[in-house]
Image (cartoon, rainbow, N blue to C red):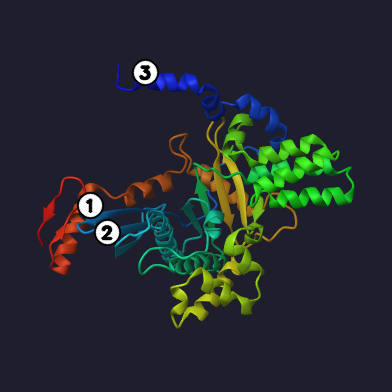
Amino acid sequence: MPRFADLFVEEVRRKRSEVLRVIGGGETLAGRYADLLRKVWVAGVAAGRHFERVYAVDSGSDEIEVSGGGVLLVTRAMALEAGGREVRKLRLDALFPRDVRDYEDFKRLVREHVEHLVALEALEEGADLLLIDGSLYGRMIHVIRELEVEGREDFVLEYVEAYSELLSKALKAGAVVAGVSKDSRSTVLKEELLLAQLAELLSGCDPGLRGRVMELWRLLKRRPSQALNGVRLLVKEGLDPRVLELFEEARSAVPDSKIIAASGLGAGFTTPIALTLERVSTGITDLLLRSRDEELEGELARAFERASERPDFSARARSLLRALRGYPPVYTTYAVFAAGDDPVRVDVAAPDLPKLEGRFANPVPGTVRRVLAHLALLYGGRRCYNALLLEVDKRVRTTLETLELYHKLAMREVGELILHSRGERRVFYP
């Protein structure tokens, strides 16, 4: 028997209920959400070619660790057209990482940033549909903060400027940007479904009580304990206890993809939800969106202590505010391209998608339908949710052989010995 197999079985038996909650739970989830989902479910996704110049964008990174604690971080991104044309970009960062968490955040942000830059080049090549691996909205709500990465402390400002430029230029050019996520932990749809159910429960309540409950709902993400305690007090005063159940369910980590898969509604997609940055109510983003322009520099100066000493900081602060306020609405939907397959989250930013007063875009905008139809055309089954994105993913991955080549090329260019520090030490000479 393989080592630890006996211990694994013991743990599975001991934590059976936890395991079943994560891998199973279909009947329970279907019982709770199936009827709610049917109200926002559009059956079927017909494949069709609706765009001429389609590019898929992805990135990868790896590092050459050198003696003394230094790192050469290599980040590559590519925009791959359906016809095979490549647009490439590579960035090199030489640094001494200090804070592990901030360095990991920096690596992730740099990958996305280089994707934005290569996507801008694809726009110049005439792209009318850009497919980006990941959530468009998730990139809008990154925390605006200083990083403990020497020389890159204010990198988030550069990130926001480039991302805003990409979305702005795409919309001006009449192009569509779509984020495609296979493994999404998002709960935005679940929260909207529960909110609709909450509204029904409160429909017959006193307006004052209804207002108090909705204020607690808005508080739930920022201060969950305070919100839940507030609802418990209201329940003691006579509020329907089902309201507390909805609050607790909203706090659960069960993602949208899980409830859609459990409901077994077949091929189709959810009515899109319009997301804007105003929905974010955390951290400095909240302050920036609600601050007057003259207050902006002070808010950012406190968040970017080192960068605020630079002479161009005021201009960059104003540029950041324009970028954040200029983000377009993103329409988010979940698509199932074949019955029994995993849901794919699709975020769409396009010039003809207006801001909505309500949450759901009903009727479904034609642009969203066109994007989904084209994605269905690129769908190749459970293991190939998007042929173009999977192909570009292969091309940007960094192999050990490639890293060793980069190592040798770096030494040749700088004329210095670079001593490798990873694992079995390898020494290459320029």
Q: Residue at x 61, y 35 (%)?
A: 260
- Badge 3 local density, few (<14 within 10 Å), some, or many (20+)? few
- Badge 2 local density, few (<14 within 10 Å), some, or many (20+)? some
Q: Quadrant of residue 6?
A: top left
Q: Position of residue 10 (x, y in %)?
A: 43, 19
Q: Position of residue 422 (x, y in %)?
A: 21, 49
Lateral position of residue 248 relative to residue 425, left or right: right
Q: Which residue is mark 2?
A: 71
Q: Residue at x 69, y 52 (%)?
A: 219
Q: Is residue 270 visible to us here?
A: no
- Badge 1 local density, few (<14 within 10 Å), some, or many (20+)? few
Q: Secondary structure at mark 3?
A: helix
Q: Which quadrant of the figure contains the N terminus?
A: top left
Q: Is residue 294 visible to us here?
A: yes
Which of labels 2 and 3 is toward the front?
Answer: 3
Nearer to me, 82 or 34: 34
Residue furthest toward the top?
1
Q: Is residue 130 above or below residue 155?
A: above
Amino acid type of disc 2?
A: Val
How many marks the image carries: the answer is 3
Q: Secondary structure at mark 2?
A: strand
Amino acid type of disc 3?
A: Asp
N-terminal-most mark, 2 or 3 = 3
Residue 402: which disc?
A: 1
Lateral position of residue 167 relative to residue 190, left or right: left
Q: Position of residue 124 (x, y in %)?
A: 44, 68
N-terminal-most mark, 1 or 3 = 3
Lateral position of residue 416 relative to residue 280, left or right: left
Nearer to me, 10 or 422: 10
Q: Residue at x 33, y 54 (%)?
A: 61
Q: Which residue is mark 3?
A: 6
* Distance from Cα at disc 2 to Cα at disc 3: 41 Å
